[in-house]
Amino acid sequence: MGKKIICFIIYFCVTIAPSYGNGFVYDAHGKRDPFVPLTGAKKDMVAGMVKLEEVVSVDDIALEGIAVGDKGSRIAIINGEMVHERDVFGILEINSILDTGIEVSISGRKYSLSLKKE
C-alpha cells in the first residue's frame, strides 16, 4: 500500500503538477473580457481609442456603457471615459444620456448612438 502511494505521488509530481505552473488563460468566447478594465490606468492602452478631446467624427466614438443612479442621474462610458450630460470635450458635446443610448453634437451637428446588444 505504501508503495502505491509513493508511486502516485511521483506520478503526480512528474505528469500533472507541472501543468498547473503554466497559468490560467481566460477565454472570452468573443465577449468583453471582464478582467480588462473599462476605465482606469490602462484605458489609454485600448487599441484604436481616440481621446474625447480629439474626436472629429461620430466614427471616433465608442459607447461602452450607461449607468443610472438611484436618483436618476446618468453617466455614460465613451472611449473608456465616464461622461455626464452637458460635458464638452473639444468639438464634442454630450447632449443627453438615455436608457439605451446617448445624443451628442460634434461641431454643432447632432448624432444618436445606441448601446450594442451582445
Image: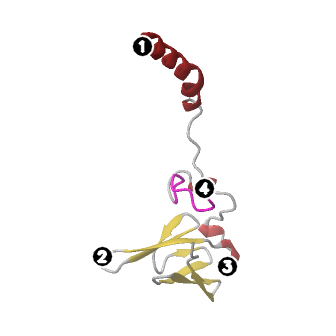
Q: Which mark is residue 70?
A: 2
Q: Secondary structure at mark 3?
A: helix
Cα distance between the residues tagged 3 and 4: 19 Å
Task: For marks 1 and 3, give the CA distance.
Answer: 72 Å
Q: Is any atom of residue 57 visible in this view? A: no
Disc 4 versus disc 2: distance between alpha carbons? 30 Å
Which one is earlier in the sequence, the residue at label 1 or at label 2? 1
Report the residue that reaches farthest toward the left: 71
* Residue 75 falls left or right of residue 59: left
| Residue 52 in view (yes/no) | yes
Q: Are marks 3 and 4 in contact (CB under 8 Å)?
A: no
Amino acid carrying label 2: it is: Asp
Q: CA distance from mark 1 to mark 4?
A: 59 Å
Amino acid type at circle 1 is: Met
Crowding around mark 3 (Cα neighbors within 10 Å: few <14, some 14 to 19, many 20+) is some
Numbered disc 4: secondary structure: helix
Give amino acid for label 3.
Val
Residue labelled with disc 1 = 1
Q: Residue at x 56, y 27 (%)?
A: 16
Please identify the quarter of the rendering in which residue 92 is found: bottom right
**Label 4 crowding class (10 Å Cα cut-off): few <14, some 14-19, many 20+?**
some
Q: Nearer the viewer, mark 4 or mark 2?
A: 2
Q: Position of residue 105 (x, y in %)?
A: 60, 84
- For the residue pair 7 and 81, the one nearer the viewer reads as 7
Question: Of helix, strand and loop, which one carries label 2?
Answer: loop
Q: Nearer the viewer, mark 1 or mark 3?
A: 1
Judging by the rendered image, the residue that carries numbered circle 4 is 44
CA separation, marks 3 and 2? 30 Å
Q: Which mark is residue 58?
A: 3
